[in-house]
Image: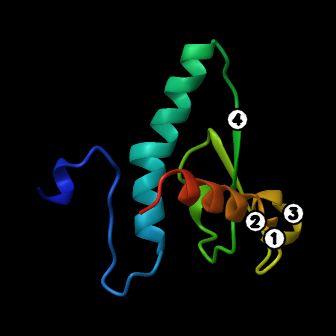
Amino acid sequence: MGVKSLPVAYGHQKKAWMNFKLVEDWMKKVFVPEVKRYQEAIGKTGEVLLLIDNAVIDLLNSVDELVTIKFFPPNVISLIQPMDQGVIRSFKDLYRKVLPV
């Protein structure tokens, strides 16, 4: 089974870094179409805000007029995102207890 047969968006870069092309492809092929589908399903329209952590890709605001992108400053995500303050770790610990690997 190759990655193309998996039901997920897949992209790669030779050095395993996130770059503009990967994010741009994801935005155009996955994020924006899904946002539009969701908005249509709930009967809403308008701009959406995408928050990206620690990104150096600042050219993305030109990808689609529907999406406004804001970048968190480097190394502050744990201060502003509660999930990074132990909730995910606690969930993983409980998950491992229930479904031992």
Q: Which of marks 4 and 1 is in front?
A: 1
Where is residue 84 drawn, in percent x and y? 76, 65
Residue 47, numbered circle: 4
Count the marks. Answer: 4
**Mark 3, residues whose alpha carbon is within 10 Å: few (<14), some, or many (≥20)?**
few
Kind of residue sitting beneath label 2: Asp
Residue occupying image coordinates x 49% and y 25%: 37
Relative to 13, does residue 9 appear above or below in the rendering? above
Residue 19 seen: yes
What amino acid type is highlighted by mark number 4? Answer: Glu
Color theme of the render = rainbow
Query: Which residue does the numbered mark 1 point to in the structure image?
Result: 78
Query: What residue sits right under mark 2 in the picture?
Result: 84
Which residue is located at x 48 percent, y 70 percent? 20
Res 80 label: 3
Image quadrant where one finds the C terminus: bottom left
Comparing marks 4 and 2, which lies closer to the viewer?
A: 2
Q: Distance between the residues labelled 4 and 2?
A: 27 Å
The mark that comes first in sequence, 4 or 2, is 4
Q: Which mark is residue 26?
A: none
Where is residue 29 shown, x and y percent of the image? 39, 46
CB within 8 Å, label 2 to label 1: yes
